[in-house]
Amino acid sequence: MFYVYLIKSLKDQRKYIGQTNNLDQRLNQHNSGKVTATKNRVPFKLIYYEEFVSREEAVLREKFFKTHKGYNYLKKLGYY
């Protein structure tokens, strides 16, 4: 399975969207400072994720979430 996830920094409240095939491992990487894009904002809390059968679907959904429409969708759900 593949996942698109939204995490929130408990340090500065900013959010990060990504995709992975191992959600627990990826969250641990974020929280241990091993991800360059988020290493200065640890710790993180997982606040939303979606599951997909293929990586291609997950990548497309991640790209959607990073658009204005995707932001509005997540905002409507209460995650922004």
Image: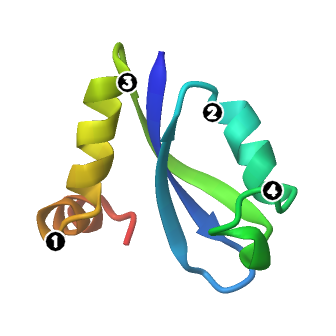
Q: Earlier in the sequence, mark 1 or mark 4?
A: 4
Q: Residue furthest left?
A: 69
Count of all numbered marks drawn on residues in the image: 4
Q: Nearer the viewer, mark 1 or mark 4?
A: 4
Q: Residue 47: percent from the left, percent from the top? A: 54, 54
Q: Is residue 58 left or right of residue 20?
A: left
Residue at image mark 1: 68
Q: Earlier in the sequence, mark 1 or mark 2?
A: 2
Residue at image mark 2: 23
Q: Earlier in the sequence, mark 2 or mark 4?
A: 2
Pick the front one: 59 or 43: 59
Amino acid residing under circle 1: His
The quadrant of the rendering that contains the C terminus is: bottom left
Instruction: Say few, some or many: other residues with alpha carbon within 10 Å of mark 4 (under 14 / 14 to 19 / 20 or more).
Output: few
Q: What's the CA distance linking mark 1 and mark 4?
A: 28 Å
Residue at image mark 3: 55
Q: Residue 77: percent from the left, percent from the top? A: 28, 57
Q: Is residue 53 left or right of residue 12?
A: left
Q: Is residue 37 left or right of residue 19?
A: right
Q: What's the CA distance linking mark 2 and mark 4?
A: 15 Å
Q: What SS does tag 4 mark? A: loop
Tell me the residue at 55%/79% (across/down): 14
Instruction: Say few, some or many: other residues with alpha carbon within 10 Å of mark 1 (under 14 / 14 to 19 / 20 or more).
Output: few
Give the vertical position of 42 relative to 13 (above or below). Answer: above
Residue at image mark 4: 34
Q: Residue 36: percent from the left, percent from the top? A: 70, 66
Q: Earlier in the sequence, mark 2 or mark 3?
A: 2
Q: Residue furthest bottom?
A: 12
Q: What SS does tag 2 mark? A: helix
